[in-house]
Image (cartoon, grey):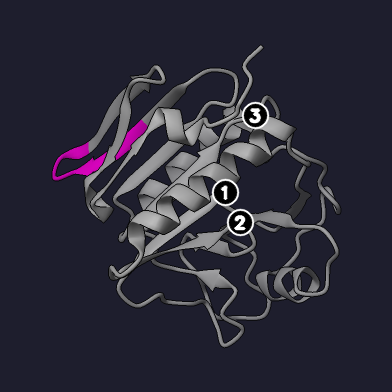
C-alpha cells in the first residue's frame, strides 16, 4: 500500500468521490483500489532535486512536441469503469511527468493525465518501497504510452532507469556526478551534476 495514512481504512471510496474530495482538498492524496492516502511532505533535498529536474527538463523540451507537468497533476493508471461506484484503480502524483504530443485527460477537469511518456520519482525513506513495487507494476502494466520510468536518489548521485523494450523493460543504474542521464524517448540528456546542483549529501 502507499506510504502515509489511509483516511478511511477499511471503507472503500469510489473514484468519483475521491476526485470530488481531492479537487477541494488542501493537501494531496493518492488513491489505490478504493482507499485514499495522505501524501507525506518532502525533505529539502527532495524538494530541491525536483526543482532542478523541472528546470533542466523544461529547458530541454522547449520548442518540442513534449512538455513537462509538475507534481500537482495526477496520473491515472489501471482499468477504469465509468460508474460512480467504481473503486478499482490507482491515481498518483509523480514528482514530474512528461507527455509528448497531445495530453489525454480523465475528464473535463483536465487534472488527471492518461498518457505520460516519462515519469520521474525522487525517492525518500517513506516512499521508496512503494515506488519500486506497487507503483512501478501499475505504471508498466496499465500505461501504454509510458516509455521510461526514473527513480532518483536524494542521498547520493544515483539514478535508476527503466526503459521499455519490445520484450520487456531494461533496467540501468547511473551513478556519479560525472555521468549523464540519457532519455531517448524525449531526446534529452541531463548531466547528474546539473540535476544535483547545490545538493549536499550526508
- The reply to whether dot 1 and dot 3 touch (C-beta < 8 Å) is no
Category of crowding for the residue at label 3, using alpha-carbon neighbours closer than 10 angstroms: few (below 14), some (14–19), many (at least 20):
some
How far apart are labels 1 and 3 at the CA level?
A: 12 Å
- The reply to whether dot 1 and dot 2 touch (C-beta < 8 Å) is yes
Classify the position of the C terminus by image quarter. Answer: top right
- What x and y, as percent, mark residue 72? 64, 62
Question: Which numbered tag is attached to residue 95?
Answer: 1
**180, 143: nearer the viewer:** 180
Query: Residue reaching furthest front?
Result: 198
Say if residue 1 shows up in the picture. Answer: no
Range drawn in magenta: 161-168
Query: Which residue has dot 3 on it?
Result: 124
* 166 inside magenta stretch: yes
Q: Earlier in the sequence, mark 1 or mark 3?
A: 1
**Residue at (33%, 45%) from the top-left corner?**
148
**Residue at (64%, 39%) from the top-left corner?**
48
Q: Quadrant of residue 158?
A: top left
- What x and y, as percent, mark residue 111? 60, 74
Q: Determine whether the residue tagged by mark 2 lies in a helix, strand or loop.
A: loop
Query: Which residue has dot 2 on it?
Result: 71
Q: Determine whether the residue tagged by mark 3 lies in a helix, strand or loop.
A: loop
Question: Which numbered tag is attached to residue 155?
Answer: none
**In the displayed structure, would residue 175 be above or below residue 128?**
above
Amino acid at each position: 500500500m502507499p506510504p502515509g495514512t489511509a483516511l478511511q481504512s477499511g471503507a472503500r471510496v469510489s473514484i468519483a468521490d475521491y476526485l470530488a474530495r481531492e479537487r477541494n482538498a488542501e493537501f494531496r492524496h493518492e488513491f489505490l483500489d478504493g482507499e485514499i492516502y495522505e501524501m507525506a511532505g518532502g525533505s529539502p533535498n527532495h524538494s530541491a532535486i525536483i526543482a532542478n529536474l523541472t528546470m533542466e527538463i523544461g529547458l530541454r523540451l522547449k520548442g518540442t512536441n513534449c512538455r513537462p507537468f509538475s507534481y500537482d497533476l495526477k496520473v491515472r493508471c489501471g482499468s477504469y469503469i465509468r460508474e460512480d461506484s467504481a473503486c478499482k484503480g490507482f491515481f498518483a502524483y509523480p514528482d514530474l511527468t512528461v507527455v509528448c504530443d497531445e495530453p489525454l485527460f480523465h475528464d473535463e477537469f483536465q487534472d488527471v493525465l492518461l498518457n505520460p511518456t516519462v515519469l520521474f520519482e525522487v525517492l525518500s525513506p517513506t516512499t521508496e518501497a512503494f515506488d519500486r513495487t506497487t507503483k512501478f507494476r501499475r505504471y508498466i502494466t496499465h500505461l501504454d504510452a509510458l516509455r521510461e520510468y526514473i527513480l532518483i536518489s536524494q542521498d547520493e548521485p544515483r539514478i535508476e532507469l527503466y526503459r521499455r523494450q519490445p520484450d520487456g523493460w531494461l533496467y540501468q543504474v547511473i551513478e556519479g556526478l560525472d555521468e549523464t542521464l540519457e532519455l531517448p524517448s524525449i531526446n534529452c540528456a541531463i548531466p547528474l551534476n546539473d540535476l544535483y546542483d547545490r545538493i549536499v549529501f550526508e
